[in-house]
Amino acid sequence: MNKATIRQILLITDGCSNAGEDPVAMAGLAKEEGFSVNVIGIMDEGDEDERGMTEVEQIAKAGGGMSDVVYAKHLSHTVQMVTRKAMTQTIYGVVNREIQQILGANRQVEDLEPEKREELMEVVDELGETANLDILILVDTSASMKNKIPRVQEALLDLSLSLRSRSGENHFCLYSFPGKREEVERLLSWTPEMDSLKGAFKKLSSSGVTPTGPAIMEAIRVHSKRMKRGFTGDETAYFEESGM
Amino acid sequence: MRQPTSKNQACNFRPGQMIKGRWHGNQYQIVRLLGEGAIGKVYLANRTGQPVAMKVARESMSVSSEVRALRQISKVRGVSLGPFFVDMDDLEGAHGSTSFYVMEYIDGEPFLSFINKRGKEWMALFLIQLLTDLSALHESGWVFGDLKPENLIVTQKTPSLRWIDVGGMTKMGRSIKEYTEFFDRGYWGLGDRKAEPSYDLFAVAMLIMNVGYPKRFQRINGGKKELLDKLKHQPSLSPYRDVIVKAIEHRYDDASQMKVDLMKVMKKKLTVSTPEKMHVRMKPTHKKRAHKRVSNVRMERKYKGTLETAVFSSFLLFLYILYLLG
């Protein structure tokens, strides 16, 4: 059976990047490579940082993903919603491109009769349920994030619960930035067992720098490496078939 | 969820605005905004003088997916909980096309506020009605998903329960599309998010908890003990204790089992408030004969003319409705 794999980068941060490459540009690059970048911004109550939140939106937009800005206590629900919506969006995007090829360049799903679209949605839902998902999680662990890390951990465990309820396979890996010695540090390599992240956050460094751009760059590298090793890539960017 | 601003504006209609569908050509006049949800906005609108509800989404795929759920509900025999589907179309605008769908406008009072005003005894009645319909829905291969008081409305004339948001409806075996934390077993660490009957039944149990705790409560660590403690500290929930516990332990395989247990609770409550006689009335066999008894008893008791009778007969009315629901 042929199974599609959806590849996502999930970035969880609380503010502005201040070191290295521009994260918006890096997100654009990720999109070109076939990975969608979804961003969750965490706000402190009573302290809505406009600049940081604009960056969150811009990164997601450039990365072809979804974004949301929430208080830490709403993190769990948001992380799973954003991930889910982004998956549907990715599949929808692929279906849309297929339709353009069949119907001609200027026509999209929206140009189909509403009733036909309904049938199409069934296909999109089915694919979203059965597709494999590779999700690379990038967590901002700069000083201001320190008290939010328990919430982040809780949200990621909750995400894994939602994803495990699908019938497709899921693989996660976890990186934090800034790392102890380098800009980005690996906390967990690819695994289907998200539960192993309990404790992964224990040994974190606190630092004022937030190298979001370099973190996304590392995420692209890690994703690409896995893609080359495990699968025979083809021209469909987000979505590739592997004989299984 | 944050969306590009242009898409957000596309959902904004003003009162009086005329909306004409691109595909089916039906015309609607916007009356007012009814509410705002995760995927878009709901307006009250007029279609040739008839009030209808119009849901406008930021993404056309959400419209397609909800309409599919609405059509599914209408296929389920005997289930009248959901709004009837009327139309689905696109509006051509400056920002491109915007998808919307039109459904029956259900006028009524939100579930919780109705129960607060009219009394807790209504809860069991509505839940039994809800479980009857859930049972039929589950049999058709679907799970409701996002079950919560905000999605339930009590209609005015003859109080009955309807649901107004089908965004969470999920095919059996898939992962739940949409949920609300308090009603989600995953949030409490008491199960996964696979669409199966027991997922909905957990939410029904939390619905009862919500009646006991109108402001809900925060999760501390999650787990069964936390919910059981809450249950213990709200005496008004004690009659429902066993039903709630069974539902959160996933001991009900289908809605009808939970319904039977809830009916037992009601029966017990009635026996307590009015001794003798109630046993006869509740025997589930001989439905027709039981009917007669109900009305006979009502006649007899009327003569006594006490306050108790008034309360009592309203219970009988519920029973009557129950029998009608079958």
Image (cartoon, rainbow, N blue to C red):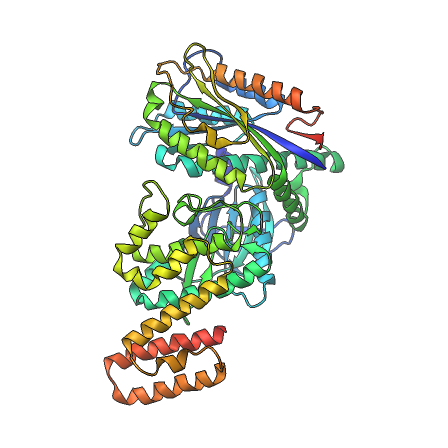
Tell me which residue sits at (66%, 20%) in the image.
A229
The answer to whether residue B110 is seen in the rendering is no
Residue found at the far left of this picture? B306
Looking at the picture, how far across and down is residue B17, in whole percent?
49, 50
Question: As displayed, is residue B142 above or below residue A65?
Answer: below
Q: How many numbered tags mark residues here? A: 0
Q: Residue B76: horizontal and vertical position, in percent?
A: 59, 63
- Is B19 in front, or is B273? B273
Task: Let me know if residue B88 appears in the view.
Answer: yes
**Looking at the rendering, which quadrant does residue B299 occupy?**
bottom left
Residue at image coords 38%, 56%? B245
Left or right relative to A43: residue B17: right
Left/right placement of residue B238 relative to residue B194 reads: left
Considering depth in this image, is A69 or A142 the residue closer to the camera? A142
Residue plotted at (53% across, 50% down): B195
- In the rendered structure, the answer to whether residue B241 lies left or right of residue B198 reads left
Compared to A209, does A112 lie above or below?
A: below
Q: Position of residue A40 (x, y in %)?
A: 44, 29
State whether residue B168 is above or below residue A189: below
Residue B310, image x, y percentages: 29, 79
Q: Residue at x 44, y 86 (%)?
A: B292
